[in-house]
Amino acid sequence: MPAYLVRIIDTRDLVGIFVADDEDYLAFAVDERTDAPGCEYVELPTGGIMWESPAKPVPLQTGDPEDEESEP
């Protein structure tokens, strides 16, 4: 399944990276976020994103699993 990089044509703002079977599914996924006809896309080549150094820890407050009213 191909991956696509999508941006808004006028402002060149990044919309996101999407995975879709074809352009119809891509348009449907992009339309959930913004106006799909106002976007342009490019199919990404084989590869990925990787970090050359260790990832930084991200602190998360998970709340109290025993208390249903605590904020996660």
Image (cartoon, rainbow, N blue to C red):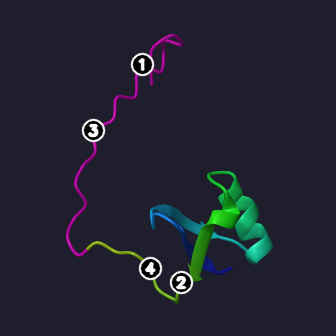
Cα distance between the residues tagged 4 and 3: 25 Å
Total residue callouts? 4
Tag shown at residue 64: 1
Measured along the vertical axis of the image, is residue 42 above or below residue 26? Answer: below
Cα distance between the residues tagged 1 and 2: 42 Å
The amino acid type, in three-letter code, at marker 2 is Leu
Does dot 1 land on a helix, a strand or a loop? loop
Residue ID at (51%, 10%): 69
Residue holding disc 3: 59
Residue toward you, 21 or 10: 10
Going by the picture, which residue comes out furthest to the front? 10
Cα distance between the residues tagged 4 and 2: 9 Å
Cα distance between the residues tagged 2 and 3: 32 Å
**Badges 4 and 2: C-beta atoms under 8 Å apart?**
no
Residue ID at (63%, 64%): 38
**Badges 4 and 3: C-beta atoms under 8 Å apart?**
no
Q: Residue 27, image x and y in percent?
A: 73, 66
In the image: residue 63, left or right of residue 40: left
Residue holding disc 2: 44
Q: Residue 19 is drawn in which quadrant?
A: bottom right
Mark toward the start of the polypeptide (4 vs 3): 4
The segment highlighted magenta reads 52-72
Does dot 2 land on a helix, a strand or a loop? loop
Tag shown at residue 5: none
**Badges 2 and 3: C-beta atoms under 8 Å apart?**
no
Mark toward the start of the polypeptide (2 vs 3): 2
Residue ID at (57%, 82%): 42
Measured along the vertical axis of the image, is residue 42 above or below residue 14? Answer: below
